[in-house]
Image: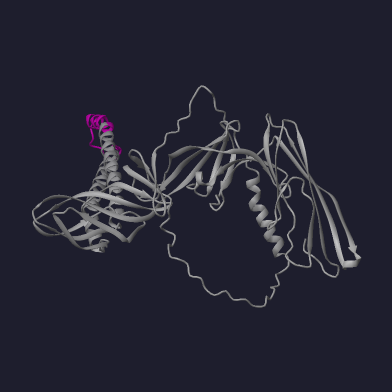
Amino acid sequence: MINTVIREVSLYRRGFTVSSEGVMHLEKGTNSVRIAGLLKGTNEDTVKLFVTGKLSGSNVQVKRLTDEEKKELIRETERKIAVVESRITSKTRQSELWLVNADFSNRNNATVEDITGYIEKLPEALERLDEEIRKLNDEKEVLNKELKKIKQKSEELYVSADVLAEEAGEYPFKIGFYSDSAYWNPIYELHTDDEKEEITVRLKAAIRQNTDVDFSQIALTLYTGNPSISGTIPTLYPQYVDIYQPHVYAAGRAANSFMSMKAMAAPMADEECAETEATDDYDEVCPEMADVSKGDTMIQYELKGAWDIKKNETVMVDISSKVISCRYHDVSVPKLDDSAYLAAEVKTADIEDLINSEASVYQKGAYVGKVYLEVDATKETYNLSLGKDENVKVTRKQVRKHTSNVLLKGQKKTEYQYEIKVVSHKPRKSLFTVYDQIPVSQNKSVSVDIRETGKGELKEETGQVKWEFELEPSAEKTLNLAYDVAWPKDKDINL
């Protein structure tokens, strides 16, 4: 069996391709060769053999050893273990005999000299035998480990091929294949300082391989693609419509589902973030270790240097770090959440290579928590959420809700009025963005009349109202929103 060494690995979000090298000794003419080095999870359809121009190959196949070949492979090591075990048994019996013969109580013809001489030799003999038994046990342990490795090797796939050589000699070759036993995940860090109009986005990779071997001094390239996901273009099938027949659910099921969801969410709510302080005396080590390029379908990160990745261990790798221009502002949606969130508004084009994932947020070096990144590439700008801003308080209250009959039109009308108050305790003048909404009618018989939005910007198609303003430290601003909803008095609405 010809051994190979892994030289290059191209790692995807799920799965990896391998390029292994070796040297084969060939005689002139056609040689049947067997090449080891295929890994756990290898996709047999992807195995390729590459030879130099002076060689030609055929009948390339992926095989396993037969049962008889496996027995032949382990037979010699099992014989060695049997020999060692026999010697251990022999030495153990010798030791027992020395102890048995030390009893002179039933031997009347033994002289004092015989007894004295035997007793003097006994400790030395037992010590010598114990040391020999210990060494034999160590030898047996080494052989058992070797046997275990041989058995593992005997279960591995190998490449079988016929190679034609014009001349006898040593020839280099390569094998390549795809395996699903490794992956990498993006780890983002957002480093912010709202005194500057920029944000630093750092990308790391958490790499893990679950093969049965260690990768040593390999060239490593990461790809954002995932070959394990189907690349087939989806087919659009007919959509059919029918009368809806509501299903009657058993009592209590909805409540139980709600409780299950609540139980699942509870641990997340209890998480706490530990803060770490950065000092002015030191500079953080954040090397860039990858050359970035874009292919037709994915992004490629070619790591610099050679890498060791042990089996079943996770390796963290620095990929890139870039500074992006941004606009810091506090964003609040008080109808859903009375918190304000610090955000960095960036151009989507500046983060178009960002992979949807979690990111750790650091504000002036202090860790403040995690956020989830999910960029909508169809929009010109994107808000990188940087977590809740404890220096801003937001309240929203309903100050009026009055329903009356409109007699001449045969309608009912409800008047709604809300008051939103934003209070800033930030140390400097800051920009704020507040969102609320006005309902949008989907029926001609239901009308919505806007009475007040202040200076809010209204999107009529969605009903979204957006206010943007600045506040000085310890200042506050009140926003008013008011509208009327009218509908036929003999109907109900789902507002």
Q: Is residue 44 above or below residue 173?
A: below
Picture coordinates of residue 416 (x, y %)?
Answer: 82, 54
Q: Is residue 47 magenta?
A: no
In which quarter of the view is residue 220 placed? top left
Picture coordinates of residue 78 (x, y %)?
Answer: 25, 53
- 206 with respect to 2 (left or right): right
For the point 8% across and 54% down, which residue is it? 167
Does residue 393 show up? Answer: yes
For the point 90% across and 63% down, which residue is it? 405
In which quarter of the view is residue 403 placed? bottom right
Picture coordinates of residue 354 (x, y %)?
Answer: 49, 47
For the point 53% across and 48% down, which residue is it? 357
For the point 73% across and 47% down, which residue is it? 456
Q: Is residue 122 magenta?
A: yes
In which quarter of the view is residue 126 placed? top left
Does residue 96 show up? Answer: no
Q: Which span is picked out in magenta?
A: 101-123
Picture coordinates of residue 203 (x, y %)?
Answer: 47, 41
Q: Closest to the observer: 184 or 312?
A: 184
Q: Closest to the observer: 217 or 289?
A: 289
Q: Closest to the observer: 434 or 151?
A: 434
Judged from this view, the residue extending furthest toward the top is 281
Question: Which quadrant of the figure contains the N terminus?
Answer: bottom left
Q: Closest to the observer: 295 or 30?
A: 295
